[in-house]
Image: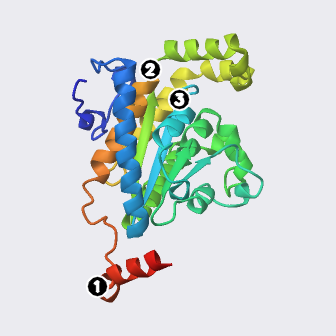
Amino acid sequence: MKEINHQNLKITKPVKLESLPTSLDTQAGKKEIEKELRETRKNLADWQDKLYAHNKYSVLVCLQGMDTSGKDSLIREVFKGFNSRGVVVHSFKTPTSKELKHDFLWRHYCALPERGKFGVFNRTHYENVLVTKVHPEYILNERLPGVNSVFDIDSDFWEERYEAIRNFEKHIAQNGTIIFKFFLNISKEEQRQRLLRRLRKPDKNWKFSPGDLEERKLWNKYRDCYEEAINKTSAEKAPWYVIPADSKPTARYLVAKIMLDRLQKYKDVQEPSLPPEILKNLEDYRKQLEKE
């Protein structure tokens, strides 16, 4: 399998999404990629066990992408080897009436992972500068002071939201949350094929909504909103990675590999040592149990 420099997928300067690849030649077949993923996710799961015992950091994994980009299956395949106590997945849908009574980041603060755990946001706080920017009328549901119509939502409004998101991520990073942000970058043609599969396969029909076709018409608007959000919020402690995602196996492997390589740099994450008074008596404890 071709060695991939995933630093090339990390956003460190402004980019144009339309110029970034949606596919990647790994010089490997599906079976080889899946084998690499199995090994990588096992190592990730082992690292998570140490994280849980160490209990000083948490990990937040943010997944964004166009409809059909493969977020759900990626979560299933990348985290399937984890101890269930060590990872919590949140899928953020339309805000509830209770959530709308708070600021737009409130429900995301509430869902942050505890120390020692992974949290996965399937769609994230970035929906507040994506879908709401494409459909600004949704902002009116937040009942914000000074925002009485979509004409009150100007460029300054969005800049304040980007700043709020940067501050949110800076704050949680300073308090021990390791942040990964992945944009699953698929082509418009690949989305068309995936939508067609949902229609052709009876067991996939439930995933399809006529609204998917209406949103697809807004492809360029969504791409522009993603591009601006990524460019304005990719930071050293909270970097964006744009993942070529036309191939689901490749995208899953890349996400897992990026996480593992970066997390293994945290050399202080180790299982705690037993107190000396317990450590010196381990043999006695073993003998006690064997005599029962």
Task: Estimate the x, y position of residue 247 in percent, counting from the top left.
Answer: 43, 21
Mark 1, secondary structure of its residue: loop
Q: Which residue is mark 2?
A: 246
| Residue 78 shown left or right of residue 260 in the figure | right
Mark 2, secondary structure of its residue: loop
Q: Which residue is mark 1?
A: 280
In the picture, the quarter occupied by the N terminus is top left
Q: Nearer the viewer, mark 1 or mark 3?
A: 1
Other residues around mark 1 within 10 Å, as few (<14) / some (14–19) / many (≥20) = few
Q: Is disc 2 in contact with disc 1, using a CB cutoff of under 8 Å?
A: no
**Amino acid under disc 1:** Lys
* Picture layout, residue 215 above or below residue 128: above
Q: Earlier in the sequence, mark 3 or mark 2?
A: 3
**Amino acid under disc 3:** Gly
Label placed on residue 70: 3
| Residue beneath the point at 21% across and 29% down | 3
